[in-house]
Image (tube, grey):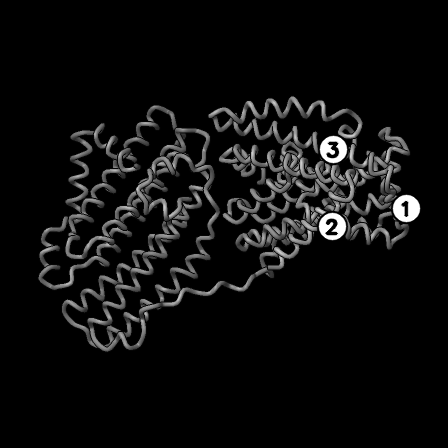
Amino acid sequence: MTRRILLTILFMGLGYGLWLSPSFKEIAAGVALFLFGMLSLERGFRSFTGGTLERVLRASTNRLWKSISFGIVSTTLMQSSTLVSLVTISFVSAEMITLAAGIGVIMGANLGTTTGAWLIAGLGLRVDIAAYAMPALVFGVVLLLQDSRTLKGLGYIAMGVGFLFLGIAYMKSGFDAFTQVFDLSAYAIPGFAGVLIYTGIGMAVTVIMQSSHATLLVIITALATNQISYDNALALAIGANLGSAVTTAIGGMTADLGGKRLAIAHVFFNLLSAVVAISLIHQVAWTVDYLAALIGIGADDHLLKLALFHTLFNLLGVILIAPFTFQLAAALERYVRFAPKPMEQPRYLYAGALETPGTAISALRKEVGRLYDNAYDLIARGLSLERALIDSDQSIKDAVRATQRIMPLDVDDVYERKIKSLHSAIIAFISETQGRGLEGASAEQLYELQQASRNIVAAVKGMKHLHKNLSRHAMSASPVVREPYDRIRAQIAKLLREIQQIRTQEAETVTSLSLDALKLSLETSSQQFTADLNERLRGQRLAPTVATSMMNDEAYSFEIGERLIEAAKALLQPGSVHDEAVENMLALDDEDIAQIAERQSHANPQGAHHGLQETTR
């Protein structure tokens, strides 16, 4: 509700300003075009983050200096610290890079974002940049019309550059006209009070526009047209940095604990840099004058001096924080512990259900079914697939191929809240039920449901290990590496779909042979997967270290599938003792299934491989 009120006030203020002043209209249009250009740039670069940016990030963060360098280079190239920050937060959340490495990237991104000020001050306001915007827009539209995802990504980047240039041109034109009717410089505030007030203004503008680059564009353009003083521009630049930390904090608060810690580190870094810059603003300004003279910047070239100031106080923050990065990370991990989310509570395990064996087993079967559903949700998310897609008749194979990134998932957190809490309640209920002296078929069913609960927990633990490796290898640019991981993901998803279809059938139509067929398919796929890996190793198409990881991950996948099938078997038990005896006679044991799968593989290896591909539909 508060956001709606603020948005309404913002629209009313903008509408009044646009109606009142044509110059303000040009300035606002310039800011809008600049922001749209940044969004287009970000969208374009996102099309290349299905593996490239992540691989480079992972390889570039094993040393602090590498982390900082990566932040500088990536933000300089993309001109989007937001995209770099989001990718970094997702990697810290997935525990693929350490918190200390993430802090290094954030520090580098703050330095990298200062290159935007240099580009605007040194180029954007000194040449007719609109002339370069038009070709970029034309080529961008042509590329967007292509079918290739890569060409579309390049199209968005070209469009982004074009709109950035066009926005700068509109801003400059608008402020040039604005100076003829209104002189903002008359409201310049000297002294320390002016520094604080303009720092707050810069921070507020950045929070509203969600872009420190756009704020710096406004500052530099206003300074170029003498609408603000040089001293006030310095304070506005400090405020822009503080505002960018606020926007990152807002985004980071939706992440898990690792992302929240990194967002706090970002706020701390920017806040410390701002406090030092404000406290020593005269000394920093003197240093800027001294360095400007050394590198040939004129004494009255306030645009480039502002860009130098922006770089200098961010560099000062890096110098202050970098030696203590690991101590900062350790402190955040020790003291930043958000209140845990509520634990899943049992729905069917109430005291009254213990009155008779029938009600106790019925309640227990329903609760284990809930546990299975929670595990289903977690495993689907671990595969980076929507549960709704798995439950539908859409092609799993196509969905797996279309995946651009393995989404971060805090398996430990979900396990504690959704799995362990229910499993503990189930075990406690079983213990209490056993104290009532159950015998015969009731005791056997109780044991089977207990094993089902354990199997579900084991499947989730297997998913924890598999998810980490999927995050590392599943989005590889090499088809030789990605294809086996696509098969692993598709196999688990297909199994989830088929178990769910069996669970939705009428109880009397479900037989053990249905689940045995799933076991056979799982065993056949496992044998074929191993055979294919061995073939690739013999052909030297795959490094032994990578093949070893794949074999381990296939083992996790096989265990997940096996445990889920066993759990489903207990949940779908026949109601009567006679039916259960018949089912047990018809059911195949593990040795039978392994022998059948091996015979099928030897009899028709091509067919087995074809069958595996079919299972990924």
Residue wearing tag 3? 170
Q: CA distance from mark 1 to mark 3?
A: 24 Å
Determine crowd level at label 3: few under 14, some 14-19, many 20+ residues with C-alpha closer than 10 A.
Answer: many
Q: Is residue 478 above or below residue 65?
A: above
Q: Nearer the viewer, residue 403 or 554?
A: 403
x, y (%) of residue 311?
76, 39
Q: Earlier in the sequence, mark 1 or mark 3?
A: 3
Secondary structure of residue under mark 2: helix
Quarter of the figure with residue 289: top right
Residue wearing tag 2? 203
Q: Quadrant of the C terminus?
A: top left
Name the residue type under label 3. Answer: Tyr
Q: CA distance from mark 3 to mark 2?
A: 23 Å
Q: Nearer the viewer, residue 51 or 212?
A: 212
Determine crowd level at label 2: few under 14, some 14-19, many 20+ residues with C-alpha closer than 10 A.
Answer: many
For the question of whether residue 242 can be seen, the reply is no
x, y (%) of residue 500?
27, 50
Q: Earlier in the sequence, mark 2 or mark 1?
A: 1
Name the residue type under label 1. Answer: Ala
Marks 1 and 3: CB-CB under 8 Å?
no
- Look at 81% across and 50% down and name the residue there: 198
Q: Earlier in the sequence, mark 3 or mark 2?
A: 3
Q: Nearer the viewer, residue 534 or 81?
A: 81
- Look at 22% across and 61% down and name the residue there: 448
Name the side, left or right, on which 599 lies relative to 485. left
Name the side, left or right, on which 241 lies relative to 431. right
x, y (%) of residue 415?
41, 57
Q: Is residue 273 above or below residue 1?
A: above
For the question of whether residue 441 can be seen, the reply is yes
Residue wearing tag 1? 186
Name the side, left or right, on which 220 lies relative to 575. right
Name the residue type under label 2. Answer: Met
